[in-house]
Image: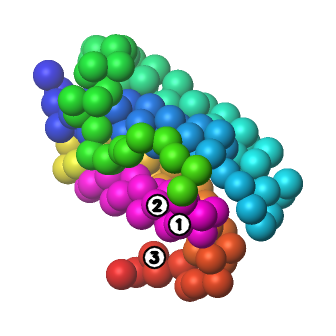
Amino acid sequence: MKYEKTNQVLNQLVADLSQLAMIVHQTHWYMRGTNFLKLHPLMDEWMDDLNDQLDEISERLITLDGAPYSTLGEMAEHTGISDQEGSFDLSTPERLTILAKDYRYLADVYQHGIEVSDEEKDFSTQDIFIGFKTATEKRLWMIQAELGQAPEINK
């Protein structure tokens, strides 16, 4: 396979984007308190964004003769993003801190994809990775700003 490493990163992203969309959904369901009216509908937008990324990543993987994970079991087995049962015990800032950690992880996976696709000279996929990494870093900045913190992209 010409783009074997790139395909591996693409499939990793299939699992990770699916998992992160579920965590955002959980945040949406279990959110209470300050800024609820602003943040609750925002989570719908974030889920839509993650699902759009997932679709583009999966379609690129298929284009490169790959086979995206397509079951919950595969997603759970391969994701690098941990989860926990839903609970109303976490505050909104605690939930956003979890999301910041997970978005930071996602940006790192995109960075790995940028490097691998460069190595394999798959510049079309690299362009996708660059665009989604940029968007992910912006999302991370916004989460951190809501928490009253710096983006910490360079850490």
* Mark-to-mark CA distance, 3 and 1: 19 Å
Q: Is residue 74 above or below residue 93?
A: above
Query: In the current view of this chain or complex, which residue is farthest to the front?
Result: 89
Q: Quadrant of the N terminus?
A: top left
Q: Which mark is residue 148?
A: none
Q: Which mark is residue 153?
A: 3
Residue at 36 percent of width and 81 percent of height = 155
Q: As shown in the figure, which amino acid type bears the numbered disc 2?
A: Ile
**Mark before the other along the chain sequence, 3 or 1:** 1
Q: Which residues are magenta?
A: 90-115
Q: Which mark is residue 98?
A: 2
Q: Is residue 139 above or below residue 25?
A: below
Q: How is the image coloured?
A: rainbow
Name the residue tied to disc 1. 94
Residue at 27 percent of width and 19 percent of height = 73
Q: Is residue 51 magenta?
A: no
**Circle 2 crowding by C-alpha within 10 Å: few under 14, some 14–19, many from 20:** some
Residue at 53 percent of width and 66 percent of height = 94
Looking at the picture, tell me which residue is in the foreground, 2 or 21.
Answer: 21
In the picture, measured across the screen, residue 4 lies left or right of residue 118, that is: left
Q: Is residue 128 visible?
A: no
**Circle 3 crowding by C-alpha within 10 Å: few under 14, some 14–19, many from 20:** few
